[in-house]
């Protein structure tokens, strides 16, 4: 059995990845990945907000998390470069459809 490593949710959020995955993937389709903080200060995934009936999808309010997005984008660019060099591609192709 392989050993799966996990990032904690606080680190995921602090790296800007929550902001960027919401901005680029979830918000345009009317969804939002939520992080909740419990009484002990621990951060956990809370669920996915569903606003798919809104034609515009979802948007960040003010202030927009610009610094978080920039931090995530820098990480993504570096990881894409590494993956492209290692595999020859960034995104894995899906299966053939009949």
Image (cartoon, helix red, strand yellow):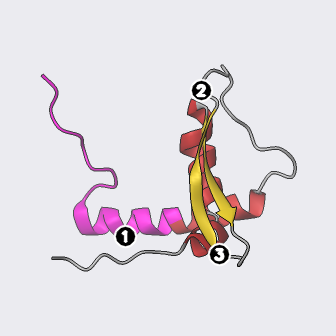
Q: Quadrant of the C terminus?
A: top left
Q: 45 and 96: which one is in front?
A: 45
Q: Of the numbered discs in the image, which one, if any, rests on residue 82?
A: 1
Q: 79 and 30: which one is in front?
A: 30
Local SS, label 1: helix
Mark 3: give few (<14), some (14-19) or many (20+) Cα within 10 Å.
few
Considering only vertical position in the picture, is 47 above or below 79? above
Residue drawn at the location 62% of the way across and 73% of the way down: 10
Mark 2: give few (<14), some (14-19) or many (20+) Cα within 10 Å.
some
Reading the chain from its start, which is encountered first: label 2 or label 3?
3
Q: Which percent across, then down, holds residue 44? A: 59, 66
Residue drawn at the location 25% of the way across and 80% of the way down: 3
Locate residue 83 relative to residue 58 in the image: left or right.
left
Q: On the image, which quarter does residue 54 sit in?
A: top right
Mark 1: give few (<14), some (14-19) or many (20+) Cα within 10 Å.
some
Reading the chain from its start, which is encountered first: label 2 or label 1?
2
Locate residue 2 relative to residue 73 in the image: left or right.
left
Q: Which residue is mark 3?
A: 42
| Residue 97 lies in the magenta stretch | yes
Residue drawn at the location 59% of the way across and 75% of the way down: 11
Reading the chain from its start, which is encountered first: label 3 or label 1?
3
Say whether marks 3 and 1 touch (CB < 8 Å). Answer: no
Q: 24 and 4: which one is in front?
A: 4
Q: 98 and 11: which one is in front?
A: 11
Q: Which residue is mark 2?
A: 52
Stretch in magenta: 76-98
Local SS, label 2: loop
């Amino acid at each position: 059995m392989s050993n799966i490593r996990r990032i904690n949710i606080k680190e995921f959020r602090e790296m800007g990845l929550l902001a960027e995955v919401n901005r680029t993937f979830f918000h345009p389709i009317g969804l939002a990945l939520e992080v909740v903080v419990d009484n002990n200060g621990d951060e956990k995934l809370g669920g996915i907000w569903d606003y798919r009936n809104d034609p515009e999808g979802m948007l960040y309010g003010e202030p927009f998390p610009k610094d978080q997005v920039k931090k995530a984008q820098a990480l993504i660019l570096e990881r894409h470069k590494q993956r492209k060099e290692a595999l020859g591609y960034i995104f894995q192709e899906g299966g053939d459809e009949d």
